[in-house]
Image (cartoon, grey):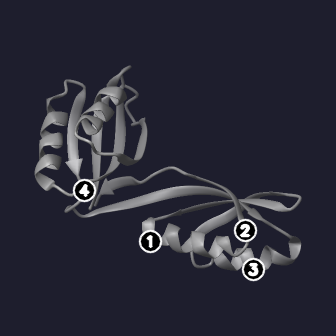
C-alpha cells in the first residue's frame, strides 16, 4: 500500500539525507518526494510517498521521524481527508493538424500546450494520480518523447 506522509522541517543542510536514511534503513523505497520552502523561509514542507506493507513498521518510522530534532510535524495522509496533485511536463509529437485533437484532450484534464517547436509540443498538466495516469494514456496516442513529474503534493482539507 502506498502511504503519503508530509513533514514540516527546519530548512537546514542535511535534513533530507537524515530523513531519507530512516526510510532506507528499514528497506523502504521512496516512490516520490517533493520538497520546498513554506511561507517561512526557515521551514520546508516535504511530501513523501512510500510503499509499505507493514503498518507497524510505518508507525515506527513516523515515531523515529518525530524524534529528529529538525522535524517539526509529521502527518500521515493515508487515512486522512486530503487533496493531492502532481504536475507533469511532457514533450509530445505535434503537428498543426493534431493541434485541435491535443487541445480537446485538455478539455477533460487540467492541462495546456505551453510551447511548440517544429514537430514537438511541451504540455503542462496537473491532477491527482488517476487523472495523470488517464492523461498519459491519451498522450501516448500522440507519442510521448519525454516526461518529467514532480511527485505528489498533498494538503489536508
**Of the image marks 2 and 1, the number of the one nearer the N terminus:** 1
SS assignment at label 3: helix
Left or right of residue 52, residue 109 in this image: right
SS assignment at label 4: loop
Residue with the mark numbered 3 = 101
- Which of the numbered marks, if any, corresponds to residue 143? 2
Residue at image coords 65%, 77%: 105
Give the mark toward the camera: 4 or 2.
Answer: 2
Give the mark toward the camera: 3 or 2.
Answer: 2
- Which of the numbered marks, if any, corresponds to residue 77? 4
4 and 2 marks in contact (CB < 8 Å): no
2 and 1 marks in contact (CB < 8 Å): no
Considering only vertical position in the picture, is 70 above or below 139? above
Q: Position of residue 117 (x, y in %)?
A: 85, 56
**Of the image marks 4 and 3, the number of the one nearer the N terminus:** 4
Examine the image and state in which quarter residue 26 appears. Answer: top left
**Of the image marks 3 and 2, the number of the one nearer the N terminus:** 3
Foreground residue, 137 or 98?
A: 137
Q: Quadrant of the N terminus?
A: bottom left
4 and 3 marks in contact (CB < 8 Å): no
Real-space Cα separation, disc 4 to disc 3, in angstroms: 37 Å
Q: Hey, which residue is sitting farthest front in the picture?
A: 27
Real-space Cα separation, disc 4 to disc 2, in angstroms: 34 Å
Q: Callout 4: few (<14), some (14-19), or many (20+) C-alpha neighbours within 10 Å? A: some
Give the mark toward the camera: 2 or 1.
Answer: 2
Amino acid at each position: 500500500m502506498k502511504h503519503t506522509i508530509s513533514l514540516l522541517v527546519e530548512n537546514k543542510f542535511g535534513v533530507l539525507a537524515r530523513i531519507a536514511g530512516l526510510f532506507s534503513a528499514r528497506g523502504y523505497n521512496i516512490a516520490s518526494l517533493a520538497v520546498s520552502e513554506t511561507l517561512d523561509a526557515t521551514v520546508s514542507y516535504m511530501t513523501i510517498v512510500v510503499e509499505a506493507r507493514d503498518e507497524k513498521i510505518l508507525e515506527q518510522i513516523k515515531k523515529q521521524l518525530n524524534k529528529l530534532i529538525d522535524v517539526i510535524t509529521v502527518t500521515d495522509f493515508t487515512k486522512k481527508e486530503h487533496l493531492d496533485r502532481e504536475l507533469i511536463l511532457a514533450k509530445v509529437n505535434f503537428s498543426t493538424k493534431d493541434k485541435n485533437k491535443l487541445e480537446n484532450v485538455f478539455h477533460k484534464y487540467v492541462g495546456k500546450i505551453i510551447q511548440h517547436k517544429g514537430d514537438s509540443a511541451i504540455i503542462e498538466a496537473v491532477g491527482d494520480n488517476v487523472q495523470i495516469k488517464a492523461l498519459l494514456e491519451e498522450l501516448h496516442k500522440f507519442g510521448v518523447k519525454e516526461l518529467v513529474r514532480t511527485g505528489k503534493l498533498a494538503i489536508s482539507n
